Image: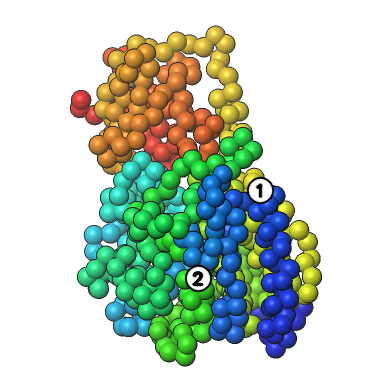
């Protein structure tokens, strides 16, 4: 494949060019924060195996005085995926596991819906998102309080969205299983393996795959969402269930060391830390992802990495986002030994991509080609709007006149299926409440809409999006089944009445 022409070559990406680019990037970052683009962000840049820039901007929490610096710990969301791929590469290099080790050998209890994929599934398949698991599989169970082990066990009930190895479907819990299985020969939890094999050897002392470590850091960034046009710290996010896929917390100082390792083929300061051939496998393009929605580059997925052929040649990268308030991005240009990582404490925002693309333009071309922040803001800002609008349109108004609900005892009771588990509907005062998850961990108030349809508002990141809970009524006048719309994306939200 011929690479697109770049405005300059590796030989002309000199330290002076990088320094000149940074001198223009810094005021751009300062202006974004001053204009309210994000409450706070941090940037790290490496070039020619040196850390050349580390700086924080803005506030850890909106309205409070604590400032972001190079040692502020952020939740990095899905930027965890390439970090975790590096950990597995270390285990592969050590001979403890192979990228082609079968999950059935490493973790015999794990199952997919069909026997053939289950028997053939490898670590490589899960890190390349080609197992056939739908992208959202397990996210719904995490949302109602199940732990990692129970979520991974219940993935066997999810029907595939594509044939095995035939389609790309980005799956948090698929990759999580790949990492957990790869760590099994070590006889230790994934979190310990990540620390021992990557974080500690690189001196990444503020990095962890445990949420408890993040909340203990004094210098940490708070998550923010937009409320009435202003950034507000409203929601906390504990991603331990999917730690390999989204649960890493780190600083730009620590991640700069990781970028050096990636760009130096597994070495730091000339000392091999990870076998080069094992790490190289993570950067091989395996699954087509189409075109970058803003820059137009041709994009593939490797093992925990996006591999892109764009306007400045080959890059490796990955974004991260928690819809309750985190954004992150890493972009590496391997031929130029250049990398940038940007962490921000807000959602929705395209600031990380916008700054990264602006920096690349400055390095390669000497000038910024377009307002990349505005272009990426439009992408992220439009993620939820259509979803909320569609849900509101569906439930815009009940039929006139609305059919009254049946007596509450027609709906009250226990319901269950293998995937969601138990759900209990009970009357509290004059309304119904739905409790789901382990020991009824999550509680949702039900508002009557029409006859046997009720509405709830389950999403912290989309608090104004209604979701339906509907009941099928049996011959005895009581509900025989219930469909929970927000748990039904993979057609597993229908629960039958169980013995009370």
Real-space Cα separation, disc 2 to disc 1, in angstroms:
24 Å
The x and y percentages for residue 254 are 47, 71
Q: Secondary structure at mark 1?
A: loop
Residue bearing the label numbered 2? 253
> From this viewpoint, is residue 249 visible?
yes
Q: Quadrant of the C terminus?
A: top left
Of callouts 2 and 1, the N-terminal one: 1
- At 36% from the left and 75% from the top, the residue drawn is 200
* Vertical side of 161 occupied by 100: above or below: below
- At 47% from the left and 90% from the top, the residue drawn is 270
| Left or right of 77, for residue 188 | left
Give 487 or 464, whichever is nearer the viewer. Answer: 464
The x and y percentages for residue 48 are 59, 85
* Vertical side of 281 occupied by 145: above or below: above
The x and y percentages for residue 328 are 54, 60
- At 41% from the left and 66% from the top, the residue drawn is 206
Give 39 or 399, whichever is nearer the viewer. Answer: 39
Residue bearing the label numbered 1? 36
């Amino acid at each position: 494949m011929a690479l697109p022409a770049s405005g300059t070559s590796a030989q002309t990406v000199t330290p002076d060019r990088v320094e000149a680019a940074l001198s223009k990037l810094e005021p751009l970052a300062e202006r974004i924060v001053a204009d309210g683009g994000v409450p706070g962000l941090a940037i790290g840049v490496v070039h020619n195996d040196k850390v050349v820039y580390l700086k924080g901007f803005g506030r850890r929490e909106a309205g409070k005085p604590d400032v972001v610096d190079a040692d502020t710990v952020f939740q990095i969301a899905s930027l965890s995926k390439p970090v975790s791929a590096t950990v597995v590469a270390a285990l592969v290099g050590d001979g403890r596991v192979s990228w082609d080790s079968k999950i059935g050998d490493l973790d015999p209890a794990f199952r997919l819906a069909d026997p053939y994929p289950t028997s053939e599934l490898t670590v490589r398949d899960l890190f390349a998102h080609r197992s056939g698991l739908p992208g959202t599989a397990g996210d719904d169970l995490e949302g109602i309080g199940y732990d990692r082990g129970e979520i991974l066990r219940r993935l066997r009930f999810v029907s595939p969205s594509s044939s095995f190895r035939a389609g790309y479907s980005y799956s948090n819990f698929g990759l999580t299983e790949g990492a957990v299985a790869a760590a099994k020969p070590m006889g230790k939890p994934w979190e310990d393996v990540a620390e021992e094999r990557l974080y500690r050897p690189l001196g990444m002392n503020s990095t962890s795959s445990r949420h408890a470590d993040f909340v203990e850091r004094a210098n940490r960034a708070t998550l923010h969402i937009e409320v009435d046009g202003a950034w507000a710290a409203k929601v906390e996010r504990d991603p331990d269930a999917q730690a390999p896929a989204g649960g890493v917390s780190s600083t730009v100082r620590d991640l700069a060391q990781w970028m050096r390792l990636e760009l130096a083929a597994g070495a730091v300061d000339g000392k091999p830390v990870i076998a080069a051939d094992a790490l190289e496998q993570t950067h091989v393009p395996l699954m087509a992802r189409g075109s970058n929605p803003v820059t137009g580059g041709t994009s593939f997925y490797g093992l925990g990495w996006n591999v892109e052929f764009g306007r400045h040649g080959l890059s490796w990268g990955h974004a991260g986002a928690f819809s309750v308030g985190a954004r992150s991005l890493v972009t590496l240009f391997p031929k130029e030994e250049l990398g940038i990582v940007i962490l921000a404490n807000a959602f929705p925002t395209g600031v990380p991509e916008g700054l990264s693309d602006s920096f690349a333009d400055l390095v390669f071309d000497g000038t910024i080609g377009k307002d990349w922040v505005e272009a990426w803001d439009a992408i992220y800002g439009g993620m939820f709007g259509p979803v909320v609008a569609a849900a509101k349109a569906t439930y815009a108004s009940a039929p006139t006149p609305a059919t009254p609900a049946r007596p509450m005892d027609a709906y009250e009771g226990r319901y269950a299926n293998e995937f969601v588990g138990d759900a209990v509907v009970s009357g509290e005062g004059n309304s119904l409440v739905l409790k789901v998850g382990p020991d009824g961990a999550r509680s949702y108030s039900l508002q009557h809409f029409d006859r046997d349809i009720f509405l709830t508002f389950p999403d912290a990141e989309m608090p104004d999006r209604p979701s339906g809970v509907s009941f099928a009524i049996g011959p005895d006048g009581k509900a025989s089944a219930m469909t929970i719309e927000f748990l039904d994306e993979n057609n597993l939200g229908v629960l039958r009445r169980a013995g009370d």
